Image (tube, grey):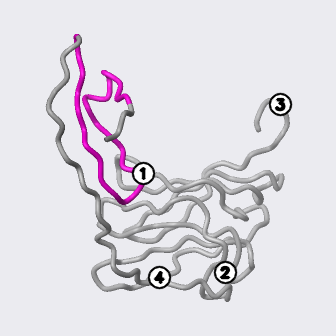
Amino acid sequence: TCALPISAGSNGLATVIAIGGANITATAGGITSSAAALSVTSTITHETVLHSFAATAIDGANPWGVLLQASDGNFYGMTSAGGSSGFGTIFEFNPTTDTFTLIHSFAGGAGDGAEPQGSLIQGSDGTLYGLTQYGGASNNGILFALDPVTQNFTALYSFAGGPADG
């Protein structure tokens, strides 16, 4: 029997934290329901490595943030190292064909970013957006856009640093 309270705002949703069993009851207004058995078993029998980063010029290293499944069904992510200049990459993974594609290698300098941070997001127009920690005109990072269809990368804004700009 499990005697963990579930808040009224949770709509009775319990969160499983381990494999096992429990008897669940509900109490409200001094009335307790009959117990219902809950059994949680593992259904994961194995895992599959879809891509192993090799830290080469045609790959990335140190994946950063979370994967974004975009509206085209593909997954997009970033690495904070690796790529042709060692400053990180943007990649695409097609789950239908199990294909990994390097889309952009960050080069640093005034026209590009370096060491992307955070996660990619997708705008309502399908464009992917992200941030880098370094690169840009003042080496304080950039805001960038990536068109997943054309794979066109655009540095949109270069952070100057300081109290007025970040």
Residue 4: percent from left, percent from top: 39, 33
Q: Is residue 88 left or right of residue 12?
A: right
Task: Work out whether 133 lies above or below 35.
Answer: below
Q: Secondary structure at mark 1?
A: loop
79 or 44: which is nearer to us? 44
CA separation in Å, label 2 and label 3: 32 Å
For marks 3 and 4, the one nearer the N-term is 4
- Label 3 Cα crowd, 10 Å radius (few <14 / some 14-19 / many 20+): few
Which residue was labeled with disc 1?
A: 17
Residue 55: percent from left, percent from top: 68, 85
Which residue was labeled with disc 3?
A: 163
Labelled disc at residue 101: 4
- Label 4 Cα crowd, 10 Å radius (few <14 / some 14-19 / many 20+): some
Identified by mark 3, the residue type is Pro
Task: Work out whether 14 lies above or below 99.
Answer: above
CA separation in Å, label 3 and label 4: 38 Å
